[in-house]
Image (tube, rainbow, N blue to C red):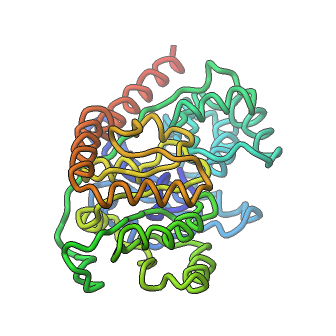
Amino acid sequence: MIDRLAPSGAEIFASRLVEMLDPTRFDRLLCVTRPFDAAHAEPLERAGVRVFPLGRRSTVDLWRWWPLVTLLRRERVDVIHSHKFGSNVWAALLRRLLRIPVFVAHEHTWSYQGQWLRRFLDRRLVAPAADVILTVSQADRRRMIEVERVDPEKVVFLPSGVAGHEPKNRRSVRQELNLPPDAPVVGVVCGLRPQKALDVLVRASATLAEAAPGVRVLVVGDGPERSALEGLVAELGLSGTVTFLGAWAPEDVPDFLEEIDVGALTSDFEGTPLAVMELMAAGKPVVATSVGGVPDLIEDGIHGLLIPPRRPDALARALAALLVDPAQRARMGAAARDRQQREFDFRSTVSSVEDLYVELLGRSSS
């Protein structure tokens, strides 16, 4: 269960997970509680996953839960696996109401600052109802235990991964923007939310343009910050350097990554970002803020460069260092791809989740 279907980290994770669960062992159903673009459900349905939309538009739309309650009762669902805080809260209530045998809550990171009500509900409602709470990084596990004071026995770090890098050759961003083949390109794929701190990237781009003439900074993604970020680009006179490309279909993102030189992540906080693992799978070095689980992916100087958050000067220097040194880019990109293939393959994640479901269901019936 998840609030929405969208081309964003947790939503992509949940969709890929339910799609890749072994259909000979599991009857797969994805409940999406909020309205979403029906196109995002088509790959799941082609793979045999039932997508069950609730169309809930606000917290007070309680009547929209009734079809799910009816389904859970009728089909005697064994496991409910929820993703992100909102769905975790509702799944905790459903588990208690309907006595569902297994409840797995999945936290896909947040800042753990402020929002006392969220911390309270995690500790007093979600954690007591859940058999296990999965986190996407060791740093998140520590914060859930130390900040939210959740029972350590309940909180389990689940290593994540990506499915690999398979360009479809459907889109060429260099052709679309009429860029020379040798133009240096920095690429970013993310939702345009405050957490991603893309204003830092925009400010760094002014210095970067001086150090790496002709550089283009391209951002794939959309979100509430887009208008403000485009305004900042215009204010700083960077319209010829920074371009926001809007959301791309997930199947086209590998085509974008294939044509960039260096990937960037400027977030204030993260769990274990799929965007970084996708850059690694594409063989691209990454310049990233050293937050959350990012240092568990990128070893500084080996797979990319780590910098402090909110430092446009450090970001510009690190990007420039890679853009002007093709040999270093190639070396780090190859090391990143090798590590992703060895350690961050999504098939291993799926296998771990399948084993967890079976283990917890066995416990519930014993």
Q: Nearer the viewer, residue 61 or 195?
A: 195
**At 56% from the left edge and 60% from the top edge, which residue is drawn?**
312
Residue at left 47%, top 50%? Answer: 288
Residue 13 higher or lower than 245, as above or below: above
Quick one: 223 or 61, which is closer to the camera?
223
Q: Is residue 299 above or below residue 364?
A: below
Total residue callouts: 0
Q: Identify the image quadrant of residue 258.
A: bottom left
Q: Is residue 24 above or below residue 155?
A: below
Across and down, in percent, residue 111 comes to 67, 46
What percent of the width, then of the height, locates residue 234? 56, 86
Tell me which residue sits at (52%, 59%) in the image: 32
Viewer-proximal residue, 140 or 73?
140
| Left or right of 318 in this view: 145 | right
Residue 322 locus on image (x, y percent): 33, 55
With 170 as the anchor, is 269 left or right in this view?
A: right
Image coordinates for residue 227, horizontal then vertical, percent: 60, 81
Find the residue positioned furthest to the top: 366
Query: Can residue 82 be seen from the camera position used here?
Result: no
Residue 287 in view (yes/no): yes
Q: Residue furthest front?
A: 211
- Res 223 quadrant in image: bottom right
Horizontal arrangement in the rendering, residue 57 relative to residue 312 (left or right): right
Q: Viewed as shown, does residue 337 lie left or right of 211? A: left
For the residue pair 205 and 282, the one nearer the viewer reads as: 205
